[in-house]
Amino acid sequence: MSNSIFGLIASTPKIKKPKSIASLQLMFIVRIWKALGEDRRLIVWSVIFGLLFTGLGIVPPLLVREMIHWLEDGGSAGNFALLGLLVAGVYGLRGGMRYLYGLMSHIAAYRTLHRLMNSVYRHVQSFSPSYMNRQHSGNLVARTIGDVEAIEDFIAHGIPETMLALVIPLTMSVVLFVLNWKLALIALLPLPIVAVAVYLMTTRVANRWRSVRGRFADLSAMIQDHLGGLPVIQSFTHEAESARRIQREGQKYRDSIIQANRWSLVPAGIIEAASGAGLVLILCSGGWMAAGGPLPVDVADLVVFLMYLGQIFLPFLRLANLMENLQKAAASAERVFELLDTPSTIVDRADAVVPAERRFDVEFDSVNFSYRRDLPVLRDVSFHVSEGETVALVGVTGVGKSTACHLLVRFYDVESGSIRLGSQDVRTLPLEYLRSQVALVSQDVFLFQGTIRENLLLGNLNATNDELREAAQTANAEKFILSFPKGYDTLVGERGVRLSGGQKQRIAIARAMLKDAPVLVFDEATSAIDAETESLIAEAVKRATAGRTVLIVAHRLSTIMAADRILVFEEGRVVESGTYEELVAGNSHFARLCRHQENVMW
Ligand SMILES: Nc1ncnc2c1ncn2[C@@H]1O[C@H](COP(=O)(O)OP(=O)(O)OP(=O)(O)O)[C@@H](O)[C@H]1O
Ligand SMILES: [Mg+2]
């Protein structure tokens, strides 16, 4: 991948270590079998119905044979109407069996798909945000839906049809051998050759399909990223370059898939040619077969041979497709299972307990943290926020303020040192307890598609209407909410109203108020707001902080003024701490910050 902006946003994790195809398939089959769970029963039923379906397919040519025998005897002995009824019955049953075997396998497949998708989603949800960064998101969606779907396809079609593809030629061959083993030897001569040729060919193309899918993943991730970043691309008038890159990536995909098809279509040709070979062999040995020759043959048997020969090679064609299907599903399964096997890093310790004594002071003790090993973000950060105190974190952009907030709720774990909530290291607390005690208002407010009410209720699903309104009032949000015709039931997001930065922030504050947690972490948004909104937010913050332990990342003087104490961050360290009055005088870092930034924000 190149180092350009496009290269960066388009980079997708590649399939890491290429395992051998055989081991991959084995792993895949074992895990699919496990994933099927109790639906294995349905697969067994599907195979049973499939076998009945196949068995019934053997019957009609034998009935035709019977009819010919009757005709040879002058037709008097036979009951042709009964024969017709029997054939109709066989085909009717066959239809039923086909329906049932397809139905069973599809039910099993979609139930397994649903379970797999749930477990992938549940698992991904437990990942720390570091895993969920932008580069991954496209790929994760592909994994949760696309890959799981490929596995479904394999269960629905792969398992039962592979069985049938093996059983049909086998049973038909047995019948042919019983009827006339010499003729069977001649007619079935091409069968093993075709089987071996198809096997060799499909394993040969397996690797090519693997690379096709890799290319497809690259392409779709790139398209998704480019479309996601379309405003950026448009604002830099990079459309032409973006289209060129998509075209180049698409070209690689196109070439690889054409190359794969060049080989993967060969087996179909071989099978087509070979299916005539049996017939040719029978025709060539026709002289021998003439009555009394070394290979006497009954005409009725010959008809059965011809009817079977038309069907016996077809399963190989299916098998060739199925191999492809299996490759695809195995590659998808590898990615899905790899994801399921990725351990979540932020999990409850085995000995995590809810503390008996509930205190809510916050302490950072010599905290060191970095996202990447070589780039320390927080260095030896120590500070204490007493219960009920409001402490503001200030500092230039990128200094690690949001990071400190995220460490408190354990989006990440500290590298060294510790963070304590009421004297308990946050890593020793159950995650659910920790996060229920801390309400976080993030810098980038995220609102879900839905109504304002639904977004607010995330704070507390059981809140009453009065509580909801009270929270909105505290956050100074009710006025603008009620200005919409539908009030609290106004849709937000793509299909609803677009809220301004200041409005979103007040919704976020209201949401945190509803949660009513003893600790509030407020990471102020940096988006510019007008003076009136600023004072509305400042008022909301003041009300919200009352009686709580508060960590507030402040970019505006009005927010800073709401704090009891100010911590100044510089290059990942706390360089100053004090009240506004103490800090603003003299030549402090804080005073310099204020002078440079002219009162507004940094
Ligand atoms: N998820 C992440 N992965 C890697 N690096 C990150 C991540 N989030 C932040 N950083 C880096 O860590 C440093 C601190 O970021 P942080 O968001 O804590 O800064 P901040 O003080 O909140 O800045 P701002 O005032 O702009 O919000 C920055 O250099 C940033 O690039
Ligand atoms: Mg920040």
Image: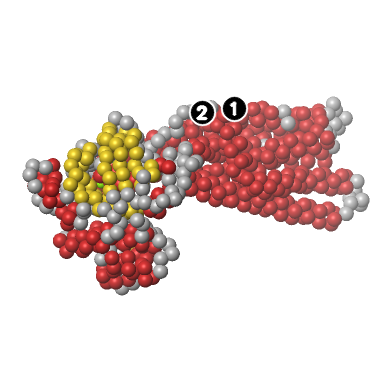
Q: Is residue 258 visible?
A: no
Q: Is residue 18 left or right of residue 12?
A: right
* Residue that label 2 marks: 19
**Residue 579, how many percent across, how many down?**
17, 50
Nearest-to-viewer mark from 1 and 2: 2
**Crowding near pointer 1: few (<14 within 10 Å), some, many (20+)?**
few
Is residue 427 in sight in this rendering?
Answer: yes
Residue drawn at (55%, 49%), measured in percent from left and top?
A: 115
- Residue 268 horizontal/vertical position (percent): 59, 36
Who is closer to the viewer here, 34 or 229? Answer: 34
- Location of the N terminus (image quadrant): top left
Q: Which mark is first along the chain, 2 or 1?
A: 2
Q: Which residue is mark 1?
A: 200
Residue 584 is labelled as: none
- Amino acid tagged 1: Leu
Q: Position of residue 399 (x, y in %)?
A: 22, 41
Q: Is residue 482 above or below residue 581?
A: below
Quarter-of-image position of residue 530:
bottom left
Say whether marks 1 and 2 touch (CB < 8 Å): no
Determine crowd level at label 2: few under 14, some 14-19, many 20+ residues with C-alpha closer than 10 A. few
Quadrant for residue 529, please give it.
bottom left
User: Mark 1: is the Cβ under 8 angstroms from ligand 1?
Assistant: no
Which residue occupies the extreme bottom position in the image? 485
Q: Which residue is nearer to you in this view: 410 or 219? A: 410
In this picture, residue 275 sits left or right of residue 24: right
Q: Secondary structure at mark 1?
A: helix
User: How is the protein colored in the picture?
Assistant: secondary structure
Horizontal relation, residue 589 to residue 120: left or right = left
| Amino acid under disc 2 | Lys
Residue pictured at 79% horizontal, 31% vertical = 183
Front position in the image: 503 or 209: 503
Q: Classify mark 2: helix, strand or loop.
A: loop
